[in-house]
Image (cartoon, grey):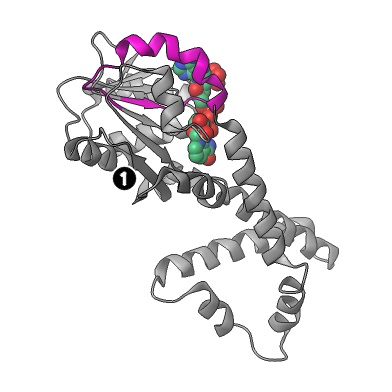
Amino acid sequence: MTIGGEPLLLVGAGKMGGALLQGWLDRGFDPARIIVLEPDPSPQVAALCAARGVGLGMPPTPPSVLVLAVKPQMLDAVAPRLAPLAMESTLVISILAGKTIRNVSDRLPGAGAIVRAMPNLAAAIGCGITAAVADAKATPAQRRTADALLSAVGHVEWLSEESLMDAVTAVSGSGPAYVFYLAECLAKAGMESGLPADLAARLARATIEGAGALLARRPDVSPAELRESVTSPGGTTAAALAILKGEDGLEKLIAEAVAAAKRRTRELSG
Ligand SMILES: NC(=O)c1ccc[n+]([C@@H]2O[C@H](COP(=O)([O-])OP(=O)(O)OC[C@H]3O[C@@H](n4cnc5c(N)ncnc54)[C@H](OP(=O)(O)O)[C@@H]3O)[C@@H](O)[C@H]2O)c1
């Protein structure tokens, strides 16, 4: 797949930038058109670039696509170097949590179209979910390019309004960590119920893996229906769910957690 005549510049090849790079190469994007700007590439990223012929450093010409994948707090530090590269024809794709399209265009005032996207950690295995929103300057061709680049690491949901991005970040951007924490809590509760620690950890991990796989394989069945199908009235699962679904149960906790993440997303704006 081609990206355009000029190179694609990936700025920041950490966890998420590295996952995107791997996804693009796996999907057959031309490595000769990709350049990675990263002060301290990990051994994996350095090896990948060397093996596939991806350039490291500043591009010789302004890129057609500039993907921002540094930490949000680094935007001000990287922007002065990038601003001269961001031209009217440049598509900027930012995955910076909390940073608005306006925040990015203020730092890269010469840039043409800006797409703000929020991937999640499962992008590292090509199973991510990314929400994206394009500004009014994005052409249909630039939107297709952004869709192809973001789809390389999973499914893409296009949003009609940027204002939805804070909630998206709090639900799917941060969401994998909530599920990992659930695995930790389940393992701990198993230990407290008398299981050896390693067995409890294996049971918790495999339970969450299996439940996730069931959700993935049965898109026609809602999570509530799956839950009801394993909850016999008066049975053991029903006893546990009575606690989880209690007044101060999981629904309230998750709602509070998502609200806190949404607030934090807004604080990162600017
Ligand atoms: N991880 C996630 O699950 C996730 C989900 C959604 C969105 N995001 C967004 O993705 C972005 C990256 O997150 P991450 O988890 O991938 O962070 P990360 O692993 O820390 O990656 C950021 C990378 O940028 C590099 N960097 C720092 N200064 C730079 C500069 N001046 N020029 C070029 N590269 C520079 C860092 O290098 P050093 O390590 O040497 O500083 C690091 O390798 C964040 O904005 C985050 O909001 C992440």
Q: Residue at position x 43%, y 44% from top?
A: 123
> Horizontally, is 78 left or right of 88 in the view?
right
Asked if residue 68 lies in the magenta stretch, the reply is yes
Find numbered disc 1 in the image and state the secondary structure of the residue it sits on: helix
> Where residue 27 appears, x then y in whole percent?
26, 40
Query: In the image, is residue 222 above or below residue 104?
Result: below
> Where residue 165 appears, x then y in whole percent?
47, 45
Q: Is residue 199 visible?
A: no
Residues in magenta? 66-91
> Where residue 96 appears, x then y in whole percent?
48, 32
> Where residue 240 appears, x then y in whole percent?
74, 76
Q: Residue at position x 53%, y 20% from top?
A: 74
Residue 22 vs residue 2, the one in the foreground: 2
Asked if residue 263 lies in the magenta stretch, the reply is no
Q: Quadrant of the N terminus?
A: top left
Q: Amino acid at mark 1?
A: Ser
Query: In the image, is residue 103 above or below residue 200?
Result: above
Q: Residue at position x 42%, y 36% from top?
A: 19
Question: Mark 1: few, some, or many residues within 10 Å (few <14, many ≥20)?
Answer: many
Residue 100 vs residue 125, the one in the foreground: 100
Return the residue at label 1. Answer: 151
